[in-house]
Image (cartoon, rainbow, N blue to C red):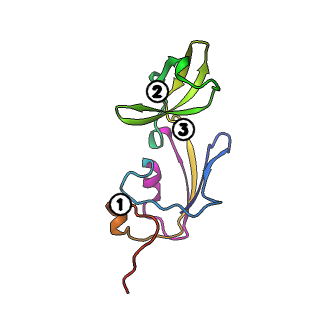
């Protein structure tokens, strides 16, 4: 499918496949945000669908408790608001954004950058096919595909 995602209030495009190959996703494997998959159910080839997702259907609402303070000396010297970093946690890597840089402490935001945002998508289906065995079993083999003759 080809898609363009915008923020409805500003019209700003945050993601688009226009300059890339169409994106493929496997239905029913939670590869996509919940509302996106639901809105595309039953779409036909060449059909274009427009839909707007609330934060609940997309990346969740912002959680103020996800804003934490970390010691300034844990960060590189060049540090600006809006920079993104990755931290190791018990649940694997977590991304966070620098909110505020102080002399001794840095405010960091573990919310998903898109949390709390309403997202509008325009999606055009380019192809529908069954997932191959590799895809369905999560082996995601990219590159050479063997063909039997």
Mark 1 residue element:
loop
Could you say which quadrant of the image residue 114 lies in? top right
- Does 120 sit left or right of 35 as displayed? right
Residue at x-position 51% and y-position 71%: 45
Location of mark 2 (residue)? 63
Whichever of labels 2 and 1 marks the residue nearer the N terminus, that label is: 2
- Does 48 sit left or right of 144 as displayed? right
Image position of 126 with respect to 107: above or below: below
User: Which quadrant of the rendered structure holds the C terminus?
Assistant: bottom left
Residue at x-position 55% and y-position 70%: 46
Discs 1, 3 touching: Cβ within 8 Å: no
Location of mark 3 (residue)? 114
Instruction: Count numbered badges in the picture.
Output: 3
Task: Name the residue nearer the viewer: 38 or 67.
Answer: 67
Mark 3 residue element:
loop
Q: Position of residue 122 (x, y in %)?
A: 58, 56
Could you say which quadrant of the image residue 4 lies in? bottom right
Disc assigned to residue 139: 1
**Residue 140 on the magenta segment:** no
Crowd band around label 1 with a 10 angstrom C-alpha radius: few (<14), some (14–19), many (20+):
few
The part of the chain drawn in magenta is 35-55
Q: CA distance from mark 2 to mark 1?
A: 34 Å
Whichever of labels 1 and 3 marks the residue nearer the N terminus, that label is: 3
Residue at the far bottom: name it.
149
Q: Position of residue 57 (x, y in %)?
A: 45, 43
């Amino acid at each position: 499918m080809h898609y363009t995602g915008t923020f409805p209030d500003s019209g700003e495009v945050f993601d688009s496949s226009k300059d890339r190959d169409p994106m493929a996703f496997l239905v029913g494997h939670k590869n996509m945000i919940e509302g996106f998959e639901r809105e595309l159910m039953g779409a036909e080839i060449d059909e274009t669908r427009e839909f707007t997702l609330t934060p609940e259907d997309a990346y969740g609402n912002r959680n103020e408790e996800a804003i934490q303070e970390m010691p300034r000396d844990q960060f590189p010297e060049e540090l600006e608001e809006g920079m993104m970093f990755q931290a190791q946690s018990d649940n694997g890597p977590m991304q966070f954004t620098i909110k505020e840089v102080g002399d001794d402490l840095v405010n960091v935001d573990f919310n998903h950058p898109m949390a709390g945002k309403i997202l509008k998508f325009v999606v055009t289906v380019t192809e529908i096919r069954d997932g191959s065995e590799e895809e369905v079993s999560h082996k995601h083999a990219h590159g050479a595909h063997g063909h039997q003759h």
